[in-house]
Image (cartoon, rainbow, N blue to C red):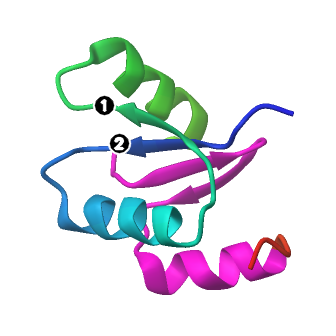
Amino acid sequence: MSLPILYIKPSCPWCVEVVDYLAEKEIEVREVIVSGNQEAMQELIDFSGQSKAPTMNWHGEVLADFGVDELIPFLKRKEII
């Protein structure tokens, strides 16, 4: 199965926190930087209906504009942590 996609903006503090948390937990995702990348930004908007980061596409399920506090229960529901 393909990796979940994490749309990020490198200068976003919430994105940095989420990337660090996922690395700490050894949860693999494919990171897509949307800053300065019109095609990736459009993909994010088409998928989620918004342009905020971080946003996760977890095999078709969207978690948009979140921080670690929202990510933890999402991952628990998925039985990842």
42 and 77: which one is in front? 77
Count of picture labels: 2
**Residue type beneath disc 2:** Ser
The answer to whether residue 6 is above or below residue 40 is below
Percent from the top left, x then y, of residue 25?
58, 72
Q: CA distance from mark 2 to mark 1?
A: 9 Å
> Can you say which quadrant of the picture contains the N terminus?
top right
23 and 62: which one is in front? 23
Q: Is residue 50 visible?
A: no
Query: Element type at marker 2?
Result: loop
Residue sitting at 47 percent across and 52 percent down?
55
| First reached walking from the N terminus: tag 2 or tag 1 | 1
**Residue type beneath disc 1:** Val
Percent from the top left, x then y, of residue 42?
41, 21
Q: Is residue 69 magenta?
A: yes
Residue sitting at 34 percent across and 52 percent down?
53
Percent from the top left, x then y, of residue 38?
28, 15
22 and 37: which one is in front? 22
Q: Is residue 38 visible?
A: yes
> Can you say which quadrant of the picture contains the C terminus?
bottom right
Q: Check contact, mark 2 vs mark 1: CB within 8 A.
A: yes
Which residue lies under the disc numbered 1? Answer: 34
Which mark, residue 51?
A: 2
Which residues fall within the magenta stretch?
Answer: 50-77
The answer to whether residue 21 is above or below residue 5 is below
Query: Element type at marker 1?
Result: loop
- Outermost residue on the left side: it is 11
